[in-house]
Amino acid sequence: MLLSLVLHMHSVRCVLPAAVLLGTAPTYVLVWGAWRLLSALLPSRFYQAVDDRLYCVYQSMVLFFFENYTGVQILLYGDLPKNKENIIYLANHQSTVDWIIADILAVRQSALGHVRYVLKDGLKWLPLYGCYFSQHGGIYVKRSAKFNENQMRKKLQRYINAGTPMYLVIFPEGTRYNPELTKVISASQAFAAQEGLPVLKHVLTPRIKATHVAFDSMKDYLDAVYDVTVAFEGSVDDKGQRKEAPSMAGSHIEMEKLHKAEEGET
């Protein structure tokens, strides 16, 4: 019975961090809203500095749970820059955890508050978060012909003119790579072949419009471009076939399965 209780408690481990993060979100947005009003008559750099600090505090909670509560082991190699940089962070997209990887690097550069995302337009309807991400410097973009290039350029230029620190995260694929969605992968590969592009097997063909606008708008403002490819342990089976990458809710379960396999348990 005790073992059953332990297993049950483990199965709901994600409840605590979800409750804390979602439960504190209204208070966070309320504090941010109050500061937004109070700083309306101040230069924008004052608003941005405090907003970046508030964002850093909230995202630090996210990282605390991810790095200390899920059992995930994180190994970083190489030397991180000593000075904060204005960067574009480009990465493959296969999991709901991918955005946290950018945070892991940013927090070790004391730049967590500077992280801003290029996001697909549908995410702006997320309660609380959707509105705030845009206010923090996030940019919502629509796909294909609906993409508004001028709107994105104007927003980026506004941040550049204000001297806003930029740790701009872009997932050029536009959607997550999932090996179980064979039609999506086939369509991406067919498009690449039709356009004379390399046919990619482990990522989707990038959608370059937002990435191009970001590079073109920020080319004189950037210190570096981070070209990142993330690989999750256990996402390839014994036959060498790709499996779906772990999600935020399922990462601790995947780690438990991995530990049991290593110990020879059934």
Image (cartoon, grey):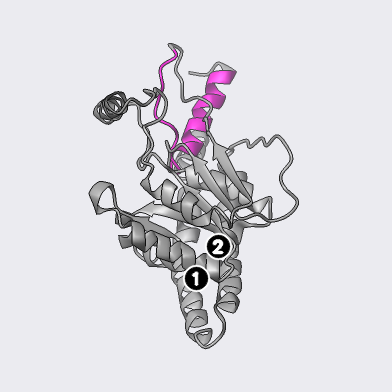
Q: Which mark is residue 151?
A: none
Q: Which residue is mark 2?
A: 58
Q: What kind of element bears circle 2?
A: helix
Q: Nearer the viewer, residue 79 or 55?
A: 79
The amino acid type, in three-letter code, at marker 2 is Tyr
Instruction: List x then y, in percent, for residue 2.
Output: 52, 37
Q: Quadrant of residue 171?
A: top left
Where on the picture, by quarter, is residue 50?
Answer: bottom right
Locate residue 39, reporting x and y percent: 53, 84
Asked if one can make out residue 24 in the rendered structure from this viewpoint, the answer is no
Q: Is residue 185 magenta?
A: no
Q: Residue at the spot x=43%, y=38% of the render? A: 93
Given contact means CB atoms under 8 Å apart, are the residues at marks 1 and 2 in contact?
yes
Label 1 – label 2 distance at C-alpha: 8 Å
The amino acid on which the numbered mark 1 sits, given as a three-letter code, is Tyr
The residue drawn where x is 29% and y is 53% is 147
Q: Is the residue marked by circle 1 packed among few (<14), some (14-19), or many (20+) residues within 10 Å? A: some
- Examine the structure image and report whether residue 261 is included in the region drawn in magenta: yes
Q: Nearer the viewer, residue 57 or 169?
A: 169
163 versus 40 height, above or below:
above
**Residue sitting farthest toward the top:** 239
- Circle 2: is it few (<14), some (14-19), or many (20+) Cα within 10 Å? some
Q: Is residue 28 above or below residue 202?
A: below
Q: Left or right: 123 with respect to 262?
A: left
Residue that badge 1 annotates = 28
Which segment is the magenta one? 240-262
